[in-house]
Image (tube, rainbow, N blue to C red):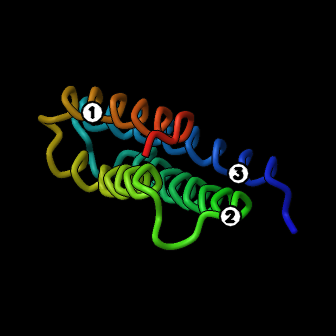
Amino acid sequence: MIPYQIYKLVHLMGVLTLFLSVGGLLLYAFGGGDRKHPWRKLLLITHGIGIFLAVLGGFGLLARIGITWPWPGWVASKFAIWVIFGALPAVIVRTPAWTKTLWWIALVLGGAAAYLAGSKPF
């Protein structure tokens, strides 16, 4: 069985990778968002890897602490936040005028996810 610490490391590496890619995508879109830019594909691939690792590690952590269906409210809320982060590249690429707003939304959602994981309020 995989230890709790490994799942936590995978989850945190996924979160860091995800935020790296979202920040890069926001700057890419803010700078004009040329479809032929060499970084575009790398940023989108990095986003996919990050979201995969974050969800994989998160579900591993849930299994290790014994949380099953139906999920508590904090787990469902975090899952909804990760779904939003999964959709962010599509929104960023299609609506570059929203980059400044999406920058702050990503920051607030990340903070909310960290709060939910740390305090498990409901």
Q: Secondary structure at mark 2?
A: loop
Residue lying farthest to the bottom in this orientation: 69
Quadrant hosting residue 24? top left
Please determine whether, in this image, residue 122 is positioned above or below residue 59: above
| The N terminus - image quarter | bottom right
Q: Secondary structure at mark 1?
A: helix
Q: Residues within 10 Å of mark 1 (few under 14, many from 20)?
A: few
Q: Residue drawn 26% across and 38% down?
A: 29
Q: Which residue is mark 3?
A: 10
Q: CA distance from mark 3 to mark 1?
A: 24 Å
Q: CA distance from mark 3 to mark 2?
A: 18 Å
Q: Earlier in the sequence, mark 3 or mark 1?
A: 3
* Coordinates of residue 6 in the picture (x, y in percent): 80, 51
Q: Residues within 10 Å of mark 3 (few under 14, many from 20)?
A: many
Q: Amino acid at mark 3?
A: Val
Q: Which residue is mark 1?
A: 105
Residue 62 shown left or right of residue 112 in the figure: right
Q: Nearer the viewer, residue 82 or 45?
A: 82
Can residue 31 be seen by looking at this rendering? no
Residue 42 shown left or right of residue 8 in the figure: left
Q: Nearer the viewer, residue 90 or 118?
A: 118
Query: Looking at the image, do the residues carrying marks 3 and 2 touch, with CB atoms under 8 Å apart?
Result: no
Numbered disc total: 3
* Coordinates of residue 37 in the picture (x, y in percent): 37, 45
Q: Amino acid at mark 1?
A: Ile
Q: Which residue is mark 2?
A: 66
* Coordinates of residue 45 in the picture (x, y in percent): 50, 57
Q: Which mark is residue 4?
A: none
Q: Residue drawn 68% across and 64% down?
A: 66
Q: Nearer the viewer, mark 3 or mark 2?
A: 2
Q: Amino acid at mark 2?
A: Gly
